[in-house]
Image (cartoon, rainbow, N blue to C red):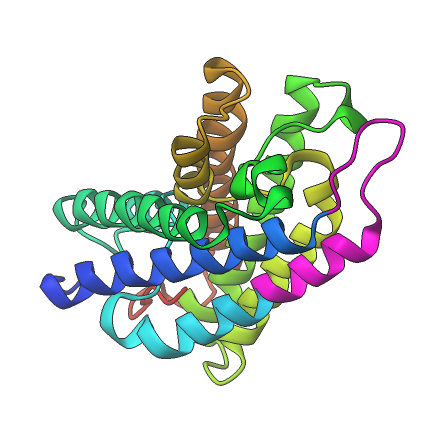
Amino acid sequence: MEDRGPAAYIAEFVGTLLLVLFICLAVSAFVTVADAQNPAPFIDFSVIGLVHVFILFVLIQTLAVASGAHFNPAVTVALTVLKQLKPSDAVIYVLAQIAGAVAGALICKLLLKEFPNAEAVNFGAVGISDRLDGNLGLGMLAEFIGTFLLMFAIMGAAVDPRADRAVGPLAIGAALGLGVMVIAPLTGAGFNPARAIGPALVSGEWGGAGDFILAYLVAPVLATLAAAVAYANIFFAPGGKSREGMEPVG
């Protein structure tokens, strides 16, 4: 476990800023303003899912060498539990990620403040859809499933020392994009506490503080912990390959 320094912290800030900026721009531009009777078409979420794939792929390829390219407090928590990151570094990572997410959402609002659709979708803020009748339990489950898929891909494609590093960033981006395509119509597909906090803070749209905390902060952290522990115990079980040498990427 190596010490992280200012370059890693800056990478997490910049990476999360760009991730949230591109996500919020895509949501603001492509999501049709809808209601329970007239939901947004699936093609909207397909486009947004592809944006997630490519922006995360680019950011991992660019910044993984500097910080491990977490860009997600839930991922940072899980990798810290796996002793991939020192707790002191993890705290700074999370603060940098949240600051980056807020900055990204602010830039999105600055760019699109005169664009009616952007304000109508709260500049990319997440929320439990009418399709789930506002059901908190189902919203938490959806966020858990999407985040679990993302973290499982990170474990298999980047953290596992046997992983093919050449395709790891694309596999992780694809896992995120797939989750967004399927789950965004239900919850907005946060899968990332920083991504959820940034636009919520900028737009003032929390959808109820208690529900927000449980669905977009607690559920993703539980999911990354479950995925990381499950992968480590199944694929690094006694008799399997040692965990030694594992490094966080993604």
Residue 138 horizontal/vertical position (percent): 70, 24
Q: Nearer the viewer, residue 99 or 249?
A: 99
Q: How many labels sit on residues?
A: 0
Residue drawn at 42 percent across, 38 percent down: 193
Residue drawn at 48 percent across, 76 percent down: 163
Q: Quadrant of residue 36?
A: top right
- Residue 35 magenta-highlighted: yes
Residue 219 shows in the view: yes
State left or right for residue 226 relative to residue 183: left
Q: Nearer the viewer, residue 131 or 122?
A: 122
- Residue 111 magenta-highlighted: no
Residue 108 horizontal/vertical position (percent): 44, 52
Q: Quadrant of residue 70?
A: bottom left
Residue 47 horizontal/vertical position (percent): 71, 62
- The magenta-colored residue range is 32-52
Residue 201, placed above or below residue 177: above
Residue 161, placed above or below residue 206: below
